Amino acid sequence: MGGRLEGKVAVVTGGSRGIGRGIAAAFAAEGARVMITARDAERCEQTAKEIDGHVDFEAGHVARPDDMERVLSATLSRLGGLDVLVNNAATNPYAGPTIDVDRARWDKTLEVNLTAPMLWIQAAWRARMREAGGSVINISSVAGIRTNPILGTYGVTKAALVQLTRQLAAELAPSVRVNALAAGLVRTDFARILWEGERGDEVARAYPLQRLGEPADIAAAALYFADSAASGWVTGQVLVLDGGSTTAFDGRP
Ligand SMILES: NC(=O)c1ccc[n+]([C@@H]2O[C@H](COP(=O)([O-])OP(=O)(O)OC[C@H]3O[C@@H](n4cnc5c(N)ncnc54)[C@H](OP(=O)(O)O)[C@@H]3O)[C@@H](O)[C@H]2O)c1
């Protein structure tokens, strides 16, 4: 265990599984007190028990304001502060050309992936960070940088999340830093259909670094943005973590 986040309190949405769990574990290992939240309370409880260090949980839906307020107030009362907010929970209910998306799934994707992070930042700012300072980390995706035949709607929300990052970085400075991580394909349940079996090997071979991402790859970068001793002069930035995929030769002359 290290001490890079000793005395800090972090909230990680979607912290029960995948990348969020990896981030919660990395923060706890560096001495932070961490609140994880996700819809499945049992899963949250299990994850909180399994991670070494001080991890608490409060279940809820990331896009429901009452749930959000409950999680934030539990964080302040039980963990005693709020220094780092990781907007990690996201959804991708629609796979197909964006031109054909139905209104319900378009709205759902925007609500969970863009509106919810905005509301969480607003609430964290008002409840604590405006006075006490802090670091916000938004989990975006390379799907928000490039086009994609089936992930376009999700990608639109992830691109907007990057612009929200820049806008709020400018507005909330100097007390609060706001940064984003744009991940390539990471081996979690969320993206299982894209990496399981031979498909994953094929994708990995196409990445310059020749492997898919793991939650720990994203967690290490989140730790950098959370740790003001390391990233105290960095705000409004998006760090791409994708095994080099967005810089790979694409075969065109
Ligand atoms: N995996 C990839 O390849 C990849 C690539 C780029 C970016 N990302 C981004 O990385 C982030 C994490 O993805 P992941 O791959 O780690 O996903 P994951 O393994 O499916 O985990 C998602 C987490 O979010 C929670 N969650 C989902 N919907 C929620 C909601 N409405 N309210 C509250 N919690 C919710 C889930 O728990 P419950 O289901 O219990 O709520 C779970 O804890 C997302 O922002 C995703 O867009 C992932």
Image (cartoon, rainbow, N blue to C red):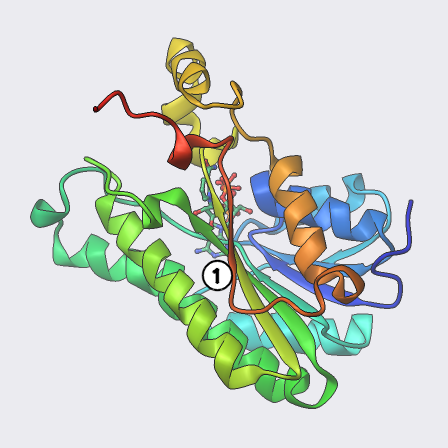
Spot the residue most to the top. Answer: 198
Residue displayed at 8% across by 46% down: 100
> Would residue 17 be seen by someone viewing this image from the given angle?
no
Residue displayed at 65% across by 48% down: 221
Residue 209's place in the image compared with 89, above or below, is: above
Write down the quadrant of residue 246 in the picture. Answer: top left
SS for dot 1 = loop
> Would residue 173 be seen by someone viewing this image from the given angle?
yes
Write down the quadrant of residue 80 in the picture. Answer: bottom right
Q: Can you give x and y, in whole percent of width and height, for residue 73 in the image?
A: 67, 78
Front residue of 110 and 136: 136
Q: Which amino acid is tagged 1?
A: His
Front residue of 125 and 72: 125
Residue displayed at 57% across by 38% down: 18
Residue 3's place in the image compared with 243, above or below, is: below
Quarter occupied by the N terminus: top right
Residue displayed at 71% across by 42% down: 46
Front residue of 41 and 26: 26
Q: Can you give x and y, in whole percent of width and height, for residue 213 in the image?
A: 55, 30
Q: Can you give x and y, in whole percent of width and height, for residue 125 in the image?
A: 59, 83
Write down the quadrant of residue 63 in the picture. Answer: bottom left
Front residue of 182 and 103: 182
Is label 1 within 8 A of ligand 1 (CB to nearest ligand atom)?
Answer: yes
- 4 horizontally vs 176: left or right: right
Disc count in the image?
1
Q: Residue beneath label 1, please? A: 61
- 75 horizontally vs 195: left or right: right
- 92 horizontally vs 222: left or right: left
- 58 horizontally vs 194: left or right: right
Circle 1: is it few (<14), some (14-19), or many (20+) Cα within 10 Å?
some
Spot the residue most to the left. Answer: 100
Q: Can you give x and y, in whole percent of width and height, for residue 81 in the image?
A: 77, 76
